[in-house]
Image (spheres, grey):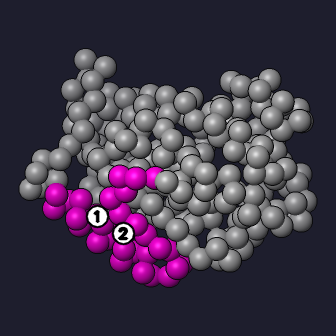
Amino acid sequence: MIDKKVVLISISGFCGTGKTTTANLFVEKLSKAVMVRGDLLMSDAALKYLEEFEKIFDMPLDVNDTYYSISKGINKGATQFGAFLELVHPFVDSEIHKIIESILVDPKKSDTEHIVIEWAALPICPIWEESDYRVMIDAPKEERNRKLYERSHPLRIPKEEYRNAGDIREEAIKKIIKDVKRINFHIYNTFDQNLVKDVQQICDSITQSKSQTKLHKKWRK
């Protein structure tokens, strides 16, 4: 039986907006916090739905290098990426729940107070509604597209294939986040020190609210 109180904070937004950087800042500034990354679970999802993956992207899945296969597939277009997200989001959500439960029973993490979850497709997952706080992050389009193009990619994929990466990912993700409601905080990331200040203000608000209202989420197994 798990009867543990934690505060869940979910972070979503377009690809390249700095969700992981932002999530790391939350973990740094909140007490006893850990992070869960939804995008890291897509490799497991691709393996689980191997046949569906190969049908959606019209290519074989390299089971020894799923990161390569997912990146290669996504670069084919927003339609394919969107279909993949629709397919795998229930699995990713289930895995996030399992990770949270594992954190709560881990003696080394028994004092966890905050769990920060980040993934672009979180708004279509039940965990989004279950979260105590939902954060939507955006950034100037040209800047996030440039960062997507310049970030590290599988060496097996020519960099030129990422020329339209930003537009592909935006087109797929905007169908998920354009009508999102129940957002507690918005961040516009201009990739400067303002991000640190914005996160600090939100963390102060969360801490104050928790202190005054005992706003916690109970998890039971």
Work out how far the residue at label 2 is from the one at label 1, CA to CA, in angstroms.
6 Å
Residue at far front of view: 179
Find disc 2 in the rendering and name its residue: 199
54 lies above or below 129: above
| Picture residue at 81% right of the left edge, 64% below the top | 164
| Picture residue at 78% right of the left edge, 31% below the top | 53
- Which labelled disc corresponds to residue 203? 1
| Picture residue at 40% right of the left edge, 66% below the top | 186
Q: How many marks?
A: 2
Q: Is residue 121 left or right of residue 23?
A: right
Report the magenta residues as a range.
180-209
Q: Amino acid at mark 1?
A: Cys
Q: Is residue 89 left or right of residue 154?
A: left
Relative to the observer, which residue lies in front, 1 or 216?
A: 216
Question: Is any part of residue 2 visible from this angle?
Answer: yes
| Quadrant location of the N terminus in the rendered image | top left
Residue 163 in the image, given as x and y percentages of width and height: 83, 67
